[in-house]
Image: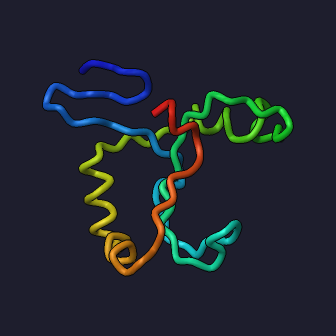
Amino acid sequence: MIEKESTIMTADGTETIYLSDDKIFYTVEGEGEFIGYPSVFMRLSMCNLTCKGFASAASPHGCDSFISWSVKNKLTLKEVFDFLDSSGYKEHLRNGAILKITGGEPLVQ
């Protein structure tokens, strides 16, 4: 395996991304411009920004930084697509749900 930043490239060419413990879920957007829209969230982990204003007992380093670095679910892109398909989320997306990539620091991925 060749490690490139936080994404792992395996010998067969597949890539692994890191998702938080929430992984992927379907819900209705609760804030912002698209409030009320059906959405599929893909929550990433591994945020390198320690936002001290959001520190708590569960996350002393701020926001979810500590948690997002300590809890990782590694999935290949194929596994992500397979999950979207098997969970029915792919059909939600085809019917107009919004895909929201959130959490973590996407540029770290």
Q: Quadrant of residue 89?
A: bottom left
In the rendered structure, the answer to whether residue 87 lies left or right of residue 109 reads left
Residue beneath the point at 76% across and 30% down: 61
In the rendered structure, the answer to whether residue 64 lies left or right of residue 77 reads right
Q: Position of residue 85 (x, y in %)?
A: 28, 67
Residue beneath the point at 70% across and 68% down: 31
Q: Position of residue 48 (x, y in %)?
A: 62, 28
Residues 74 and 95: in front is 95
- The residue furthest left is 12
Q: Quadrant of residue 82?
A: bottom left
Q: Position of residue 87 (x, y in %)?
A: 34, 70
**Number of marks drawn:** 0
Residue beneath the point at 28% across and 35% down: 15
In the rendered structure, the answer to whether residue 45 lies left or right of residue 92 reads right
Query: Up-down: is 85 above or below 23?
Result: below
Query: Up-down: is 51 above or below 3?
Result: below
Residue beneath the point at 66% across and 74% down: 35
- The residue furthest right is 53
Query: Is the image coloured rainbow, by chain, by secondary structure, or in one colour?
Result: rainbow
Residues 21 and 13: in front is 13
Quadrant that contains the C terminus: top left
Residues 95 and 75: in front is 95
Query: Up-down: is 41 above or below 34?
Result: above
Quadrant that contains the N terminus: top left
Q: Position of residue 78 (x, y in %)?
A: 24, 50
